[in-house]
Amino acid sequence: MHPLLRYERAVARGKAALALPGWRDWLMLAAMVALALALFIGSDAATALRDWRVATILGAIAGWATVRAGRRRLDHLVRESVIASAALDPAGRRHYATAVLSCVALMLVALGALADLSSIPAMIAGMAAGSLTAGLLPLRIPLAQAAAGPARPRARALTPRHAIDAYQLVARDPRWHIMVPLVAALASVAVATALPAQWTPALRLAIPAGAVVLVMLALTRVDADIVVFLARAGHGAWRSAVLHLGASARYAAILLPLMLLFAPHAVWPCTLAIIAVALFTLLRVWSFRAYSRRFADMILLFGAAGGAVLGASFPPLLVPYVAIVGFALLRRATRVTWSMA
């Protein structure tokens, strides 16, 4: 086995042992997975997956997300790990990509077997197209700049907003700050209007909202190092959070009027999805200011699980729950402003 794969296996085993230390934890996880699969088999989602278009889109999203996440992981290993040489080895990168894509393909096959065997080829074809597209595109699109001539005055006045936009989008050209949210909004509207009329109302509402959630998560990427730098540079907790919501705010401002015109049935689900991801981004920024990256991720994971259980059992308590968690994180995040520790 290549050293890169051995290292990743050791990291995965260590994280699993940390998250699930005892056999009772594994038993609880198995019970939750079995319950989720049982609910999926009898749900409208399994019925929708029999449509080859839905299966292809799901496979394309899975392939795209897998390749992008794998490339970012390799980039992280190259820059900040002890196995940088193994992560730079072309053979190791091929083995890594093959192993990750094989695991995702097996999960898609299992999902298709639970829904309908005829959906498996469409999901695999979509996964191949999505992974190929993600592999051909660079992690960042470096737009051309003038090679000669004096520097423009605005190029010297870089602000934290430029750094965050560069991390979230493609940077260097202000036109992308509008083009990316515009294209994403048009794609979201196209998804909402292209759904077949014979689908159940729940699916016709859930799929546009899910597409909006995916776009919002892509436009609100949060880097812990940038958040910590903003805190040490004197930027408050609210300003740090608002800076991370710039691209998503432009997307929402374009999306909601278009939805109101072309797909009014999906306006409220999409609005709720935007609010939910915006709140999640606020909590994530504040948690990164207050705690280490790993501990912040654990807080968000367990907090989201508790919120999901609370929302499913008694939805009116979800609002005070989010308010209490947000207030606690905000108080701790505010204290670390100017902290150089």
Image (tube, rainbow, N blue to C red):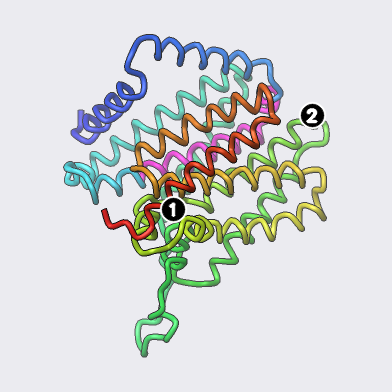
Residue 123 appears left or right of 21: right
Residue 262, percent across and down? 81, 52
Q: Secondary structure at mark 2?
A: loop
From the image, give the main secondary structure of the stretch colored magenta: helix
Read off the residue under disc 2: 200
The answer to if 66 sits in the magenta stretch is yes
Mark 1–mark 2 distance (CA, rounded to whole Å): 46 Å
Asked whether, in this view, residue 96 is left or right of residue 161, the answer is left
The residue under label 1 is 334
* First along the sequence among labels 1 and 2: 2
Residue in the image at 53% along x and 12% along y: 34
Q: Nearer the viewer, residue 265 or 245?
A: 245
| 341 up-or-down from 320: above or below | below
Residue 310 on image: x %, y %: 62, 26
- Callout 1 amino acid: Thr
Instruction: Report the span colored magenta.
Output: 45-71
Which residue appears at 19% of the width and 46% of the height? 84
